[in-house]
Amino acid sequence: MKRIACYAALTAVSLIPCLPAFAQDYSGRTLVVGTWGGDIERLLKEHVAGPLEAKTGAKVEFLLGGSGDRLSKMVAERNNPTMDVTFQNIYEAPSALKEGLVVAPDAALVPAAANVWAGMNDGCYAMSLVGLGIAYSKAVFPEAPEWADLWNPDLKGKMAYAPYPSSEGDGMLAVAARIAGVDESNPDVAFAKLAELGAPMLTYSSLDEVLTLMDAGEIAAAPMISGYVISNLENYEGIGFVFPKNPGPVLVRDMVCQVANSPEPELAQMFIDLALGVETQTAYAQQLNFGPTNSKVVLSDEEAARVINTPEEVDSLLQLDWDYVIAQRSDWTDRWNKEILGQ
Amino acid sequence: MNQTPDITPTTTTLLIAPAAVLMFGVFVLPFLFLVVLSFWSQVPGSLSLDTSLTLANYVRIFTDSYYLGGLWTTLWLSGFVTLICLLLALPLARWIVLHAGRAKGLLIGISILPLICGALLPTLGLVNLLSPLGFINGALKSMGVIQSSLPLLGNITGVTIGLVQAFLPLMVLPLINTIERIPRDYEKAAMSLGASPLVVWRRVLLPLMLPGIVAGSLLVFCAALTAFVTPQILGQGKVVTFASLAYQQAAMVLDWPFASALGIVMLLFLALAGLVGALISRRLARGS
């Protein structure tokens, strides 16, 4: 009897590492997650932080702001990070991994990562797929424009851009390069072509700001990321959004990263696992029009029409060499300031 | 009977020590790091820093016409905002002191409101007022004064309006303080001797208000020189100021050494402004 009890105890001990991590009690511990505010924070609280807190007893604390601020924070806290999980743009993720700021994606640590479309986890885990398309004033464009239509001389100076550096700006440079017959590796041509559009009427700091002016026809068009614009279209009858075909829209990804050497690596992996899970990814698609990266997500035809959600759709998108683009950041920022804004 | 305890040098040192340690830790050390960082450089195409000392960042600032232009815009814009604030604050402060009566406290409270509620909310409110579809353009259009919207955002006009709105209290408060100390008899005496109101202002009031004018001008100039939120939002990326350039380099390009050098140059100009203010104040004190 004693021997059986001993075997039972040994078996139980040996099985502990196989138990799901969240079966442990993490009461009194705090997971710090850096992300964007607004709808993204709301969805993450609802579908990720809430369930994680309920399962583990840990507290999830959100740190809101821009992805650049978070990257700065990771660099500054390189030896003693206080943030466990961070949401970054695709152009920041590969360099963050190269600098050793984040942990490489690994399905052994985050099981849901195995369901992410192949090739999407670049630097960090791919959280959502969106494309850079054209938001346009229907008063200016009765029919959905192609990229080349923006170069109509009558529209010079009637564009709006996001602040640079940004995926919108880099994407627009890549488009301009292709309109001129080259690609973004030829920045002289790209900047010269983009400069033909004139200085922007507005460098916008909020979506409402640009959409209100576009709705009134004061701004002709703006290269914008699909998700938020599509979500807002119902509020602005005078605005359309299109994914152009020549070249295709520029693929932009939001990435979720586990910060290297963070205080709570296990909680961070659990958080990311829930974020990549079907429930969260479905909510992102339904409520934000952000394409799911999890291949197991099933959307209705209507929902699927508003998002990028298949490998075929991804293949049709223009993918930039972000490693190259990010390496040009300082130089291109100077050029953007002088050649695009300072015309 | 209460006795005041003897204050020895040791007691003074002990009393000052906590604040001194705090200041050293949270201000002096980071400032020294900022200075050192400005002489480092960013490894091209990387987030890593090259810690060998170089003047490259300062050379870039003072040889690149774009950054020199940004510096020049920031300086003259700060001077212009200071002048507008002065012109608005002089009559306002005098009116509050002489005529506001019981409403004086309330008016001072209202005038310092922009300082209390921070830069962001009033600036966003101004966007709604000044935008092409905003209140001002809408009102002018509906009155038939203009046909198409006036450009009040994305240019110096918009940024000046925003900065004046934000920093007017910094001019009004020192002026109220100065004007309150000027005996009304001086003005009456000057007028009884035949001085016109203009001459009274020029020969009597303005010289007596000079300490307040210098203090207010220094505060507004320095605040405008380092302002970030208002030029960033109302300038819509088209009005380049040193603070917005430093933000872009620090938070978006992540070139901290260059951003530090921009910050140090801005601090040098702040120090220069402070020095000029101190010299003028000293001269005024000698004169009086």
Image (spheres, rainbow, N blue to C red):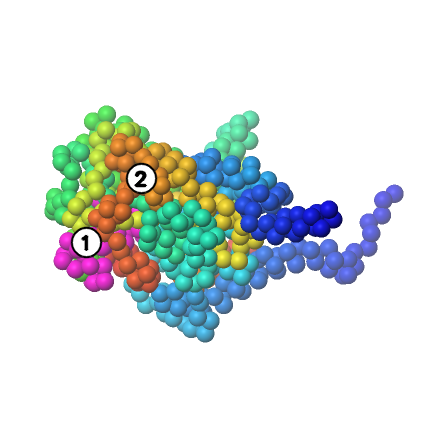
Q: Give the residue displayed 51% in from the left and 37% down from the top.
A: A51
In the rendered image, which residue does mark 2 sit on? A227
Q: Residue at x 20, y 59 (%)?
A: A183
Nearer the observer, A145 or A10? A10
Whether residue A262 is visible to the viewer of this picture, yes or no, is yes
**Residue annotated with mark 1:** A176
Please state which of the two labelled residues, at mark 1 or mark 2, is closer to the viewer: 2
The magenta stretch spans residue B78: no
Residue A231 position, x and y percent, is 31, 34
Amino acid at the residue labelled 1? Ala
Q: Secondary structure at mark 1?
A: helix
Q: Amino acid at mark 2?
A: Gly
Give the percent coordinates (x, y) of residue A39. Answer: 40, 36
Q: Secondary structure at mark 2?
A: helix
Res B269 → quadrant: bottom left
Q: Which mark is residue B218?
A: none
